[in-house]
Amino acid sequence: MNVEENRLQTFNEWPSDAVVNPQRIAKAGFFSTGQGLEVECFSCHVRLSEWNYGDQVMNRHIALSPTCPFVINPSTSGNFPILSPPNVPSSSTRNPYVEEEVRLASFANWPAASIVTPKD
């Protein structure tokens, strides 16, 4: 469970209305045990099962297990994080449909304007 993507996949049954989302929990080193809202750290095996709105998962991890190798240094704990591309696209790869007028122009032959207009 030291691979963040594998941890994230354990949240298939996680309630969509839970106060903490699975991405934040997996990023903080936890995987779902499948027992209600209980999660466990892959490194120190500390478990959490009670969540409150606004919980900062990593802060809870630090408070419960300050000597956890993942808490001390995630990069040397054996953790394999999800690597994401940068959020800012280069101008050459920018999506032209970001601009509203380009999106509207794509509806030039829209056959159902009486049902829903391109502007809608």
Image (cartoon, rainbow, N blue to C red):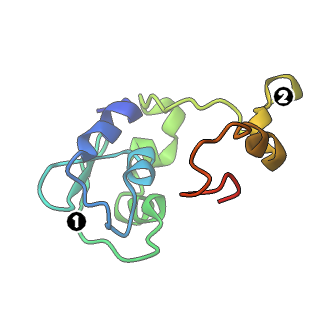
Q: Decide: is 102 above or below 14.
A: above
Q: Is residue 11 left or right of residue 65?
A: left
Label ID, residue 90: 2
Q: Position of residue 42 (x, y in %)?
A: 29, 40
Q: Position of residue 102 (x, y in %)?
A: 80, 40
C-alpha span from label 2 to label 1: 42 Å
Q: Position of residue 31 (x, y in %)?
A: 28, 45
Q: Nearer the viewer, residue 97 or 44?
A: 97
Q: Decide: is 86 above or below 26.
A: above
Tell me the crowding category of disc 1: few under 14, some 14 to 19, or many 20 or more residues within 10 angstroms, Cα based: few
Look at the numbered disc 2 and give the secondary structure of its residue: loop
Label ID, residue 49: 1
Q: Decide: is 41 above or below 3.
A: below
Q: Residue flagged by tag 2: what amino acid is it?
A: Ser
Q: Residue at x 53, y 57 (%)?
A: 115
Task: Determine the residue located farthest toward the top in the rendered image.
Answer: 92
Mark 2 or 1, nearer chain start: 1
| Quarter of the rendering occupied by the C terminus | bottom right
Give the number of marks: 2
Q: Residue flagged by tag 1: what amino acid is it?
A: Ser
Q: Nearer the viewer, residue 79 or 53?
A: 53
| Quarter of the rendering occupied by the N terminus | top left
- On the image, which quarter does residue 15 sit in? bottom left
